[in-house]
Structures are given as C-alpha cells and as structure tokens.
C-alpha cells in the first residue's frame, strides 16, 4: 500500500477511535471567533456604560431629557429596526428554529439604544444588550462557515454564553445560563463544550481589554442547622413571589402601553415622562441605570425597606415602554435590596440575605436555577453555596410558570402538581 494511503488510513482510524475530536477541533475554532467578537463587544459596551453613567451623575439635568431620548430610541426602532426589536426573544426563537440570519444591525441598535437609556436616566440593565450584540455578531459567521441548522443553534447558544459570561465576568454561569434559558427544564447537552469554551474565551478577551467588573462578597456565613435552612427556604419563597410579580408586571405594563399608545415610538416618550416625574418626586437618582452603588451597599448596611419596590417600578416602566437595556442587573438590585429588607425580620446576616436575593430573584424571573447557583458561587464564593442553592431552587419553584422571556419554552414542568404546559412558550400561557 502506498505511503499516502497508509497515512490517510491511519488518520481515518484515529478519528474513528476518537469521534469527538473533529467536533472539538471544529468548535474550538468557532468558539474562538465567538469569544473574540463577544468579549470585545462586551468590553467596549462596559467601558461606554461606565462613561455615560458618570456623565449622567455629573449632569443630573440630563434626566429631564429622558422623554426626548425615549422618542429618539422609539423612532430608531420604528423606522429602521422593526426586524430586530424582539431582542432576546428573537435569539430564543432562532435557537428553537433557525430562520434567516440575525441582522448585524441588532448589535448596533441595541448598543446605541442602551447607551441612550443609561445616559438620560432610564432604569435598565446590560445583559440584554450583551446577549444581542454577541448573538448578532456571531451569527454573521453562519454563512461563510456554511453552518447547518443544528450548528446555528449551537452557535447562538454559545454566543449567549459568551455575552453573559463576559459582561458579568462569570463565564461558568454564562455557559449554564445559555444552556438553560431557551427551554426551561431541558438542557441542550450537545452544545455544552462550545458554550463553556466561548464563555471562558469571551471573559478572557473582555479582561484583556481591561473592562471592569463589580466584585461582591459574603463574609458572614452562619453555622448550618435546621433553623438557618428553614429561613433560607422562607426567603426563597419571598424571592420567588417577587420574581413572578416582576415578570407578570413587565408584560402587563408593556401590553398597556401598546393598547393605549398606537404609535410605537411614542411609548418610550410617555414612559420617559412618567419615569422622570417619579425621579423628581422620589428626590433621588439611586434607582436609575444599573444601581451598582446601592447593590454594593445592600451587602454592608441596612437600607430603606422599600428600595426594591421603587427599583422594580422604575425598571418595569422603563423597559415596558420600549427603552433598551436588560432586566438582569435591575433584578440583581431588586433581589439584593429585598434580601436586605428581609434582614429586618429574618435572623440571617444581611450580606448573606442580599446575596441570596441577588441570584434568587433572577433565577425566578428567568427560570435558570443551575446558572444562578453557579453565578452565586462565582460572585460570592463557595462558602455560601448551600444557602444560595436552597434559596435559588425555592425561588425557581415559587415563581411559577412566569418568565421575562416570552419565547422561552417549557421543556418540563417545575413539579408534578403544575398543570402540564410542556412545549408551550410563556406567551401562550
């Protein structure tokens, strides 16, 4: 047998012996591209966000222009971005059933819209923007790489993992979030390698650009006993109910804006008026933007018990009216300050309750309990993991079949006493 045929036969035999190798090589390359794109986009976004937040806080008169800013965002999407306005739900739809490629302009529009929202004082987050930028940029690879429909699903899941992991500095949680969020109760294990690799590489790239992440800590962790476990479950129930209220309210208020204001571009205009008036009445800007300073304070000192409610109201109004951003960081704020408020009545350390609320309200609103347990470990350390996990899974159960993502599909009901809704998305319930 000629040497070249012997060589090809040996290569073929090697691949037959290790069939995962071609898959690993292929997705290592693709994940590297996704990580570079998503990590760079997140870094630029985080740096921009820090700049406009500082600019707003130094020029609080900008908040009075929030209605005009809302009109600008509304007009931009009304006339040029209708096909990408669905945002995260468009990503979820394409993970379920890939259609035409997600337009590149999604990344541009959501970036501009979110920066405007934060500059002029809307109460919004950053996760939605990071996910949409990562998904839009990464999906441009589908055509030149000639990816199949199944490969496109894996690519979009990996992009979501990269976007989430890099914007929060939590790559492991980002990967699990991407695997969980599109279908509750079911994980697409065929995407597990590229999701983790893309998230880890994206976080690495973001750090290379020297974009800053916020660091949190839980110092006071009580001895584990029956009482502390029961208090954790009780707090989880409260966090889950809060998550359900947030999810239901943001959809209902959004429907109300749509029913009362027929021209879409005017919805954020009037929403901006309401938010600006509320800020003036409250007399504080602590509930605007990401609210990171207040989140940090919730771990160290007693805050007003109503902080979580005011942040919830302003975030629901901002996002339901049509401003851009994300729900996750506001959910962190809501959860951490609600945990802080529970410290008035529950005998658990204030930083532990704040941390439990931080991840548990998010878990209940997105139906991603495993991701949120990992998020808690990455952010706060493993010492508090038992308390975090118990609060998270309890909140997940008590939030019911509600979600901030209407296109999220129920892969498996949360428990046997739930009405079987498998295969439906949250828009149909």
Image (cartoon, rainbow, N blue to C red):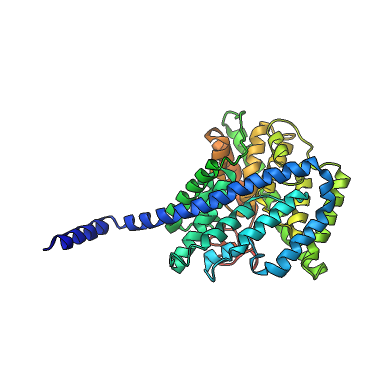
Coordinates of residue 185 in the picture (x, y in percent):
53, 57
Q: Quick check: can you spot residue 369?
A: no
Coordinates of residue 219 in the picture (x, y in percent):
61, 29
Say which quarter of the image contains residue 53: top right
42 or 286, nearer to the observer: 42
Q: Residue furthest left?
A: 1
Say which quarter of the image contains residue 29: bottom left
277 or 299, nearer to the observer: 277
**Relative horizontal placement of residue 195, taking residue 282 as reference (left or right):** left
Is 326 situated above or below 282?
below
Coordinates of residue 173 in the picture (x, y in percent):
53, 46
Q: Quadrant of the N terminus?
A: bottom left
Is 36 situated above or below 257?
above
**Relative horizontal placement of residue 150, taking residue 279 as reference (left or right):** left
Q: Residue furthest right?
A: 281
145 or 16, nearer to the observer: 145
């Amino acid at each position: 047998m000629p040497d070249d045929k012997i060589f090809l036969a040996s290569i073929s035999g090697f691949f037959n012996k290790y069939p995962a190798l071609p898959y690993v090589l292929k997705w290592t390359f693709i994940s590297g591209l996704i990580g570079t794109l998503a990590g760079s986009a997140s870094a630029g976004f985080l740096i921009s966000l820090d700049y406009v937040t500082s600019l707003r806080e130094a020029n609080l008169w900008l908040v009075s222009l929030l209605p005009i800013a809302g009109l600008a965002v509304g007009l931009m999407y009304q006339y040029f971005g209708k096909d990408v306005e669905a945002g995260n739900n468009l990503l979820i739809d394409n993970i379920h059933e890939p259609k035409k490629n997600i337009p590149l302009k999604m990344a541009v529009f959501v970036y501009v819209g979110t920066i405007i929202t934060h500059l002029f004082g809307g109460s919004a987050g950053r996760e939605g923007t990071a996910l949409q930028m990562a998904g839009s940029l990464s999906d441009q690879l589908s055509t030149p790489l000639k990816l199949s429909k199944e490969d496109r699903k894996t690519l979009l899941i990996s992009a979501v993992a990269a976007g989430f992991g890099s914007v929060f500095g939590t790559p492991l949680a980002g990967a699990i979030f991407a695997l969980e969020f599109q279908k509750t109760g079911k994980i697409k294990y065929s995407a597990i390698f590229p999701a983790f690799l893309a998230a880890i590489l994206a976080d690495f790239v973001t750090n290379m650009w020297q974009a800053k992440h916020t660091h949190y800590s839980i110092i006071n962790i009580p001895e584990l006993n029956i009482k502390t476990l029961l208090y954790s479950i009780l707090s989880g129930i409260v966090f889950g109910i809060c998550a359900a209220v947030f999810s239901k309210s943001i959809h209902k208020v959004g429907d109300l804006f749509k029913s009362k204001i027929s021209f879409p571009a005017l919805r954020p205009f009037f929403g901006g008026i309401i938010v600006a008036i509320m800020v003036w009445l409250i007399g504080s800007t602590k509930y605007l933007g990401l609210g990171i300073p207040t989140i940090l304070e919730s771990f160290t000192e007693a805050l007003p018990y109503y902080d979580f409610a005011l942040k919830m109201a302003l975030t629901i109004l901002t996002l339901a009216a049509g401003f851009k951003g994300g729900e996750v960081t506001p959910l962190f704020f809501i959860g951490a300050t609600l945990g802080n408020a529970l410290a008035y009545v529950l005998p658990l350390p204030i930083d532990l309750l704040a941390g439990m609320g931080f991840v548990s309200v998010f878990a209940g609103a997105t139906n991603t309990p495993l991701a949120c347990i990992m998020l808690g470990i990455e952010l706060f350390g493993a010492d508090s993991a038992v308390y975090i996990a118990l609060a998270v899974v309890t909140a997940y159960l008590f939030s019911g079949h509600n979600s901030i993502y209407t296109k999220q599909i129920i892969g498996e009901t949360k428990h046997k006493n739930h009405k079987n809704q498998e295969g439906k998305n949250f828009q149909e319930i």
